[in-house]
């Protein structure tokens, strides 16, 4: 449960850094600052920071240019250093669970537990079975410490570390609400990673990261046309003003999107086969490549589930004195993780579900 002032959401992605600051005005949250800064290629690989100085410089420039004075931030992490498991444990009190959680984690986390930061959320109690379902999250301490060092170098104060897939759920719930019956999937197609979060009866039931995302499409265009990565990215985006996009682009995009759609389908099939759920009613897609019609069409065809983009700002206002609303809304699909992070607050208490 959120309390206190909102933190600045900082999304350090594979291709860019996005920041969002929210403030409450007239009992409604509004965007008061935002920014995006590109990162050099290979700065972030699978969530690992390979070029710390580039990240520090970009963060400092963003906060300076956007005149963001608040330094307390929430940051998202992803990649192989992060593990998410849904587990079942006997019903116990909060104090008992705090004592037991590291032992439980040892049974489900395939790394030395001493090297991991552990957290959990109670999803659902089932008194009739004497059990409760937990969402167990573990992240390598080294990775978190690396990010924290970079943020402090940029004169920022990390207050909250979240998982990118859950930040998408945060903003979706804020803007649309989560259906309490049935199952939906939230798909964020970023530059390096596509994160899938299946939400059943209002709680996260299954997450998976897929290393087939926007950069995969760009790389296939680069190889197919023997052009630079930057030129391939421009072709993927539809070309610049007065630029003619070669006709070879369309079949390359279509074929690559089919590959990603196949991986999404297999993840959905695995969830349905192992969960006992009957169907997924809808897939909501966001991220930098969510605008690609061939991608949404391919996923809908392969998964046999309706697919629609979701607007992470449908109910968010903006402060027109500081924010160019049209500019922000034009790229809002890319800002979804930063927006989800900016919902986090500097004082939060654990939610203990009934």
Image (tube, grey):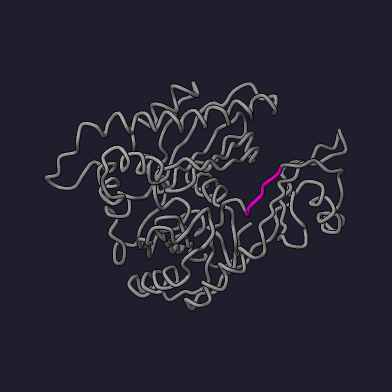
Which residue is at 56% across, 57% downward?
77
Between 32 and 114, the one nearer to me in the picture = 114
Q: In which quarter of the image is the C terminus?
A: top right
Which residue is at 44% across, 50% downward?
336
Determine the main secondary structure of the stretch shown in magenta: strand
Residue extending farthest left: 242
As drawn, is 84 to the left or to the right of 74?
Answer: right
Place of residue 261 in the rendered image (x, y in percent of width and height, measured from the top left): 46, 30
As drawn, is 6 to the left or to the right of 182?
Answer: left
Between 243 and 119, the one nearer to me in the picture = 243
**Residue 157, quarter of picture:** bottom right
Place of residue 153 in the rendered image (x, y in percent of width and height, measured from the top left): 50, 77
**Residue 223, quarter of picture:** top left
**Relative to 61, residue 131 above or below:** above
**Residue 287, quarter of picture:** top left
Q: Does the magenta stretch include residue 83?
A: yes
**Relative to 67, residue 235 above or below:** above
Which residue is at 79% across, 51% downward?
105
Between 202 and 184, the one nearer to me in the picture = 184
Q: Quadrant of the N terminus?
A: bottom right
**Relative to 301, residue 115 above or below:** below
Between 279 and 175, the one nearer to me in the picture = 279
Q: Does the magenta stretch include residue 114?
A: no
Bounds of the magenta segment: 81-85
As drawn, is 45 to the left or to the right of 183?
Answer: left
Count of picture labels: 0
Place of residue 352 in the rendered image (x, y in percent of width and height, measured from the top left): 74, 51
Place of residue 100 in the rendered image (x, y in percent of width and height, measured from the top left): 86, 54
């Amino acid at each position: 449960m959120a309390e206190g002032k909102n933190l600045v959401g900082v999304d350090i992605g594979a291709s860019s850094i996005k920041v969002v600051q929210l403030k409450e005005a007239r009992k409604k949250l509004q965007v008061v600052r935002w920014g995006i800064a590109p990162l050099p290629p290979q700065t972030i690989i699978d969530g690992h920071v390979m070029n710390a100085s580039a990240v520090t410089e970009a963060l400092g420039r963003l906060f300076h240019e956007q005149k963001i004075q608040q330094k307390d931030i929430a940051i998202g992490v992803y990649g192989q250093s992060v593990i998410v498991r849904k587990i079942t444990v006997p019903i116990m009190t909060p104090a008992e669970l705090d004592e037991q959680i590291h032992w439980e984690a040892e049974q489900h986390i395939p790394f030395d537990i001493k090297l991991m930061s552990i957290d959990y959320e109670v999803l659902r109690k089932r008194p009739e079975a004497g059990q409760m379902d937990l969402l167990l999250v573990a992240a390598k301490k080294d990775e978190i410490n690396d990010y924290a060092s970079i943020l402090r170098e940029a004169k920022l104060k990390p207050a909250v570390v979240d998982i990118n897939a859950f930040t998408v759920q945060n903003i979706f719930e804020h803007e649309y609400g989560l259906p309490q019956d049935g199952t939906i999937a939230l798909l964020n197609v970023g530059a390096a990673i596509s994160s899938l979060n299946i939400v059943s009866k209002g709680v996260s039931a299954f997450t998976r990261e897929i290393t087939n995302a926007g950069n995969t499409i760009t790389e296939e265009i680069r190889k197919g046309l023997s052009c630079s990565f930057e030129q391939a990215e421009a072709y993927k985006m539809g070309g610049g003003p007065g630029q003619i996009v070669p006709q070879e682009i369309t079949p390359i995009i279509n074929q690559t999107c089919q590959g990603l759609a196949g991986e999404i389908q297999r993840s959905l099939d695995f969830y349905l086969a192992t969960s006992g759920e009957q169907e997924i009613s809808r897939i909501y897609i966001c991220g930098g490549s969510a605008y690609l019609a061939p991608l949404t069409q391919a996923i809908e065809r392969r998964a046999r589930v309706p697919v629609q983009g979701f607007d992470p700002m449908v109910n968010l206002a903006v402060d027109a004195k500081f924010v160019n609303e049209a500019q922000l809304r034009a790229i809002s699909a890319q800002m979804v993780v930063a927006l989800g992070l900016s919902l986090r607050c500097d004082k939060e208490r654990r939610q203990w579900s009934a």
